[in-house]
Image (cartoon, rainbow, N blue to C red):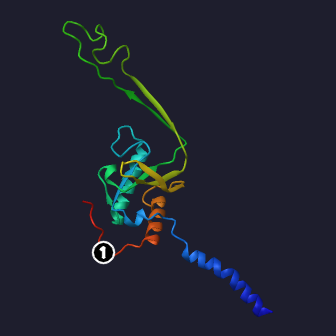
Amino acid sequence: MKRLTTVAALLLFLPAAMLAKDKKPNVPAVFGTATYVYVESPDGDFFRPGLYPADRRAIGDVEDALRDWKRYKLAVKRDEAEIVIVVRKGRLANGRLGPQVQMGQPAPPGQSPNQAPGHGPGIGASGPGVETGAEVGPEDDMLRVYMLNPDGKMIGPIWNRTLTDGLDAPGLLLFRQLKDAVEKAYPATTASQPGKP
């Protein structure tokens, strides 16, 4: 009877073990074949004026981590990449309060700036003031990965993770999760990857 129980347990366990062995990695194949990667935030790239400063830092930190990894090359333009990594620092509410400066045209000769509408330090009736703004969003950091189709449109996300403080340097836990998954699914080869023409 003991032998029959052991055989029955093996018959139940063996298919599950075989399925686990044959299970494909949860990392799409593009991670194994891509050469060029581009990093941005949902609001734009590193150089976009007005980009949330924490998102700008996250872009720079992920780019530095990619350089250290040496598996992929950073694309200068998004349309040159096969993979686009989109990062966003978490924030429940973000406020902005600061000076507003408006530039106008010089006043025509013989008129003071206040006498010529649309000229002088301010345009129209408004002048120097205070700029305000607010942004609300998820409190967890986000790292998403997209593929680009030949038309330059993003497909995906093919990888999507969020984590509280997951983009904080130097740990970059979200990036490390992606890197570990890619290395496990597609171990780096000793031969160098071909360059993009």
- Against 170, residue 117 (above or below) is above
Foreground residue, 127 or 65? 65
From the viewer's perspective, tell me whether residue 72 is left or right of residue 157: left
- Residue corresponding to mark 1: 191
Residue 100 x/y as whole percent? 37, 26
Q: Residue furthest right?
A: 1
**Residue drawn at (36%, 45%) of the image:** 45
Residue 34 quadrant: bottom left
Label 1 residue SS: loop
Image quarter where the N terminus lies is bottom right
From the viewer's perspective, tell me whether residue 12 is left or right of residue 37: right
Foreground residue, 97 or 5? 5
**Residue drawn at (48%, 53%) of the image:** 157
Q: How many marks?
A: 1
Question: Callout 1 environment at 10 Å: few (<14), some (14 to 19), or many (20+)?
Answer: few
Residue 110 x/y as whole percent? 20, 6
The amino acid beneath tag 1 is: Ala
Q: Residue furthest left?
A: 109
- Against 145, residue 26 (above or below) is below
Foreground residue, 39 or 100? 39
- Against 158, residue 2 (above or below) is below
Residue 138 quadrant: top right
Foreground residue, 37 or 196? 196
